[in-house]
Amino acid sequence: MHLAAPLTLACGLVLPNRLGKAAMTEQLALDGEPNERLRRLTARFADGGAGLLITGNVMVHRDHREHPRNVVVDERTSRPALALWARAAGDTPLVAQISHPGRQGLYAPRGSVAPSAVAMRGVGPFFQTPRALSVDEIADVVRRFAYTAKALDEAGFAGVQVHGAHGYLVSQFLSPLSNRRDDAYGGDLAHRARFLLEVLGAVRAAVRPGFAVMLKLNSADFQRGGFDDDDALAVIAMLEGRGVDLLEISGGSYESPAMLGLRASTLARETYFLEFAQRARGATKIPLMLTGGFRTPAVMEQAVASGAVDVVGLARPLAMEPDLPRRVLAGDAKPAIEGRDRVGVPLLDKILSAQTYVEQMHRLVDGRAPDPNLSRAWTIAHALWMTRG
Ligand SMILES: Cc1cc2nc3c(=O)[nH]c(=O)nc-3n(C[C@H](O)[C@H](O)[C@H](O)COP(=O)(O)O)c2cc1C
């Protein structure tokens, strides 16, 4: 079985199999600190048998968080707490996803920032209108990515994944809809990709050679006039020789949530971005992880066996069934368990359908089984409560 074959990355890190847990924001940290509840969740996922665990997004800036309860890794973060978190996965490679939310942050006490002062559309009152970053501030964010990566390396993590997808800051720079700059960081694609390439360069330079540096990138933003698949292929070509060990492919943003299958075009087939992955395969030698929609073991096996991708990324199925990798690797053909996650109101679904899986992860922390019939009223109430910090 191809899913059971190990994969050695360029940095030397060996993934014991081809099923990877994709990032899911855990919303468990208080004041940015990794804690015992987060360690319990990490250990639970490690027990499930995946060959790679990618944490939920870890913030590089304390004042800019995707969610108030994200982990923050800066000069204030407890190093012993970080080291304990790194060890919680045991022998399973644990990679921290590192991110800056830009305008897509629920927590920005001093105001949100972005490439340009362009507000998000269609997501109601959840996000502030950002102000544009100065060139000095961009350099500061690049330094913070490097600082965070180095701290995670020293703490014992196997690697980091730069979050370049889903409408967060890196992805805001890449998209002409959110990046209207006319300096070295805006304009044509080469300039819009400059921030990403500076972040990758600074991160690689800050960590040890055996430490994995990964990237999550959108195949497209799924918005008219936005970052499209040709742009994505051009960016992938720019990654050559920059020390990226694994490239994860996804798509969409809060404005257009293709990554969750909330668009007809992505829901049409089980794997949302497989065709793009096949094109990306022709454009790079970097190992590819594909995330979004995988539910059937045969489809997972086929994706790897066909040579289209190297690693199958799984997010929601693992919140519902953390032992799914173990069962798939043992040859069980039953599909993943689906959660009941849609209300049918587009704006609410954009926010809540993912939030139901946060609730499932919190059940796992407390030693409870995921609940396919989780109350939506509870999800809404708890989600609102947690945004208080
Ligand atoms: C609760 C939840 C939290 C998520 N948090 C993150 C995150 O922190 N970073 C990220 O890149 N993607 C995040 N995602 C997106 C997933 O990594 C993945 O791309 C998406 O869920 C599609 O994969 P799936 O069909 O296997 O769930 C999240 C998804 C869910 C459901």
Image (cartoon, rainbow, N blue to C red):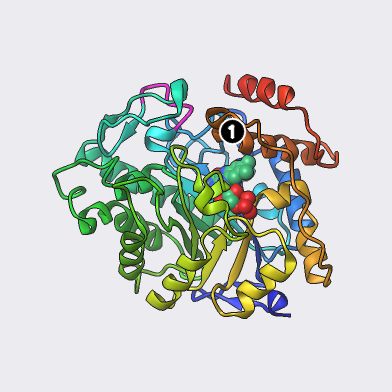
Q: Dot 1: what SS?
A: helix
Report the side of 138 relative to 66 (left or right): left
| Above or below: residue 194 compared with residue 129 | below
Q: Residue at x 85, y 40 (%)?
A: 367
- Name which residue lies at 78% across and 67% down: 328
Quarter of the figure with residue 203: bottom left
Quadrant holding the C terminus: top right
The segment highlighted magenta reads 105-111
Image location of residue 3, percent across then percent down: 69, 74
Give the quarter of the image for residue 344: top right
Residue at 21%, 54% in the rendered image: 191
| Chief SS of the magenta region | loop
Quadrant assignment, res 87: bottom right
In this view, the residue farthest toward the left is: 182
Ligand 1 within 8 angstroms of badge 1 C-beta:
no
Is residue 150 visible from the viewing direction of this image?
Answer: yes
Residue identifier under label 1:
349
Give the x, y percent position of residue 273: 51, 61
Question: Which of 294/262 is in front?
Answer: 262
Q: Is residue 94 above or below residue 175?
A: below
Q: How many marks?
A: 1
- Please name the amino acid that badge 1 sits on: Asp
Circle 1 residues within 10 Å: few <14, some 14–19, many ≥20: some
> Residue 142: where, in percent of width, then height?
33, 48
Q: Position of residue 200 (x, y in %)?
A: 37, 59
Left or right position of 326 against 270: right
**In front here: 31 or 234?**
234
Q: Quadrant of the N terminus?
A: bottom right
Asked whether residue 270 is drawn in magenta, I would say: no
